[in-house]
Amino acid sequence: MRWDGNRESDNVEDARDVGGGGGFRLGGGSLSIGSVAVALIAGWLFGVNPLQILGLMSGGSAPQTQQAPAHKPPADDQMARFVSVVLADTEDVWRAKFRQAGQTYREPKLRLFRDATVTGCGQGQAAMGPFYCPVDEKVYIDLRFYEVLRTRLGAPGDFAQAYVIAHEVGHHVQKLLGVTDRVEGMRGRISEAQVNALSVRVELQADCYAGIWAHDAQAARQVLEQGDVEEALNAATQIGDDTLQRRSRGTVVPETFTHGTGAQRVAWFKRGLQTGSVNQCDTFATREL
Ligand SMILES: [Zn+2]
């Protein structure tokens, strides 16, 4: 991916030197250790569904949070710079897309943390993988996840890393477009299997939105290099529910899928990449994912 020298976002908060466990307070009193544990189990290694985070952790009313003050990442931190450039690129793409639709894009923050962090959705853990919290509109990532992605999940490459950010920003776009609220509003009225099925559609749409980012970034800034698309598609395959389940327990249980199969993730990312169109990403309107 060609990124060096491109604009860096001002929305990156570096909280890696903030103690993850201490120095914060959770208000609301609704967050139990149990709900945190459940959320962790639910959270695979990549992209916990924000709906699950919300529903499991807050039971409706989000806990109040006090995050320790963060600062800008150091200028010589290559990995943080990369993330800042990718985030800035998503800002440019989505700002333009929203403007075309007569709407205003509200930029999300991206908070770098280590091990654990307080969030507007409860306690976040590095083991959850990168995630988006719709309450505080922040993307959270422990950058050491990229090491996991490369080695344990078999998805190397800078464009695979960019796809991760673009996917989480996709969840932010869903929040702004009202998708998150609509789906969240159905919780409690549907079965757990139906929640999982909805979750898959939410996740595949975020993949499609990540593809839209790649499409528009390529058109405007020619960011793609040889092999980049393959890196993203490989990442999408490796973090599909079927691949992850086969790897972790040897069998596959489709009813428990929350993110979609590798093939589905590839297909929806490609769809965004090839069309650049939000209308093409309506995973809720199609029968066959
Ligand atoms: Zn996701």
Image (cartoon, rainbow, N blue to C red):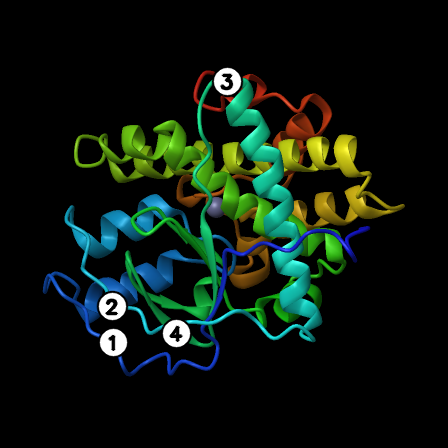
Q: Earlier in the sequence, mark 4 or mark 2?
A: 2
Q: CA distance from mark 2 to mark 1?
A: 6 Å
Residue under label 3, please give it: 101
| Mark 3 nearby-residue class (10 Å; few <14, some 14–19, many ≥20) | few
Residue under label 4, please give it: 116
Looking at the rendered structure, the secondary structure element under dot 3 is loop
Residue 152 visible at all: no
Q: CA distance from mark 4 to mark 2?
A: 14 Å
Q: CA distance from mark 2 to mark 3?
A: 35 Å
Q: Position of residue 75 (x, y in %)?
A: 66, 72
Residue under label 1, please give it: 24
Looking at the image, do the residues carrying marks 2 and 3 touch, with CB atoms under 8 Å apart?
A: no
Question: Closer to the observer: label 4 or label 2?
Answer: 2
**On screen, residue 268 above or below 121:** above
Looking at the image, do the residues carrying marks 2 and 1 touch, with CB atoms under 8 Å apart?
A: yes
Q: Is residue 35 left or right of residue 217?
A: left
Q: Earlier in the sequence, mark 4 or mark 1?
A: 1
The one of 140 and 245 positioned closer to us in this rendering: 140
Q: Position of residue 11 (x, y in %)?
A: 50, 55
Looking at the image, do the residues carrying marks 4 and 2 touch, with CB atoms under 8 Å apart?
A: no
Q: Of all residues shown, which one is farthest toward the left?
A: 29
Residue 175 visible at all: yes
Q: What's the mark number on residue 92?
A: none
**On screen, residue 270 above or below 162:** above
| Mark 1 nearby-residue class (10 Å; few <14, some 14–19, many ≥20) | some
Question: Closer to the observer: label 3 or label 4?
Answer: 3
Q: Of all residues shown, which one is farthest toward the right?
A: 226
Kind of residue sitting beneath label 3: Ala
Kind of residue sitting beneath label 4: Ala
Q: Earlier in the sequence, mark 3 or mark 4?
A: 3
Q: Earlier in the sequence, mark 2 or mark 3?
A: 2
Residue under label 2, please give it: 66
